[in-house]
DNA sequence: TTGACAAGTTAGTCACTACTAACTATATTA
DNA sequence: TAATATAGTTAGTAGTGACTAACTTGTCAA
């Protein structure tokens, strides 16, 4: 359960990378505190994580400096963010879940599902939303709303 | 990341419970070695896990005795197994993934997705497979086979 | 009945990820 | 520029979940 294949990121490290990506993306520089706030962890935990990511050459990091993604890090972060977006889209657009549940679930599931599954999911979303004969997502909404069974 | 809400099971403990459930189910008694083999962990790890599950009153466990589920444990295991089945079914019947990928992905995702999401997924599978006008799953298979893009 | 082997447990270790408390560095501002 | 607030780091600790090595218990056959 614990063994990480060489160069493979743990779920936590993926989360750190994702937050750094989003912080850099929104014009801000990623500082330790922002990362801590973004993930809801202590600043000390962030320092440890940054050291690990730096060792893997995914971020540029010097104590007391700002954090930026390396090219390698940006590629990794891109993958993670794309996975997240696809899952979130699936939960909202296909399953009709609310935005909060969708985001939370995507956050947790993105670490559990591989490229193959997420890729197929992306195709599925495309397939369903592009259909011309009938709005499946809408019909499904009718379907689950009709049933008064709780979501379980 | 690590904090478990009171009485909530970690992913590992869910795995242990799941294996015990399946072993008990197939007429066998669950012994420490069977559990170790089933999960691919050492026998020593199993002893530790059994102690934890026993403390939570999910299994009946005495050193050198056979392991059985308590009523509480059976209820928990049922939930986990049902989650697993729904996910596996989704991956195979809706996404058209192969059995091995489906099982592996279900094993990992089952710990990440809550009742609400999996419940909705169950409804979705029901909705799609019960449709009379058009076989969506089949059409999707045509769709993704046509595209020569790799699954990613 | 006893020796050998399988099954199970205990003890000790390690990696990971988090935490708090206390220290250091940087920035702001009076 | 000195005081102070904010940001960041270090050190020490804890929980989880895995491992190996070594010991104990149980069982079965000679």
Image (tube, coloured by chain):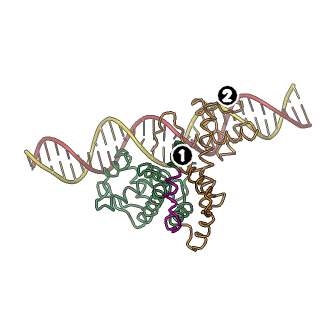
Chain colours: A green, B orange, C yellow, D red
Residue located 53% across and 53% down the image: A112
**Residue A142 shown in magenta:** yes
Q: Nearer the viewer, residue B137 or B74?
A: B137
Q: What's the chain of the residue with tag 1?
A: A
Residue located 68% across and 32% down the image: B68
Q: Secondary structure at mark 2?
A: loop
Q: Quadrant of residue B3?
A: top left
- Above or below for A7 versus B83: below
Q: Nearer the viewer, residue B40 or D30?
A: B40
Q: Which mark is residue B62?
A: 2
The chief SS type of the magenta part is helix
Mark 1 crowd level (few <14, some 14–19, many ≥20, 10 Å Cα):
few
Q: Nearer the viewer, residue B124 or A81?
A: B124
Residue located 62% across and 34% down the image: B73
Q: Nearer the viewer, residue B83 or B55?
A: B83
Residue extent of the magenta highlight = A127-143
């Amino acid at each position: 359960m614990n063994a990480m294949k060489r160069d493979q990121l743990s779920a936590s490290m993926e989360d750190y990378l994702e937050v750094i990506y989003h912080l850099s993306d929104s014009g801000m520089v990623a500082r330790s505190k922002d990362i801590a706030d973004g993930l809801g962890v202590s600043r000390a935990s962030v320092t440890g994580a940054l050291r690990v990511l730096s060792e893997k050459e995914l971020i540029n990091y010097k104590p007391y400096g700002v954090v930026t993604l390396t090219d390698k890090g940006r590629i990794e972060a891109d993958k993670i963010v794309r996975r997240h977006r696809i899952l979130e889209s699936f939960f909202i657009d296909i399953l009709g879940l609310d935005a909060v549940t969708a985001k939370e679930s995507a956050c947790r599931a993105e670490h559990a599902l591989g490229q193959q599954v997420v890729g197929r999911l992306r195709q599925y979303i495309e397939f369903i939303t592009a259909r011309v004969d009938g709005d499946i997502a809408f019909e499904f909404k009718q379907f689950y709303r009709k049933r008064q069974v709780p979501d379980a």
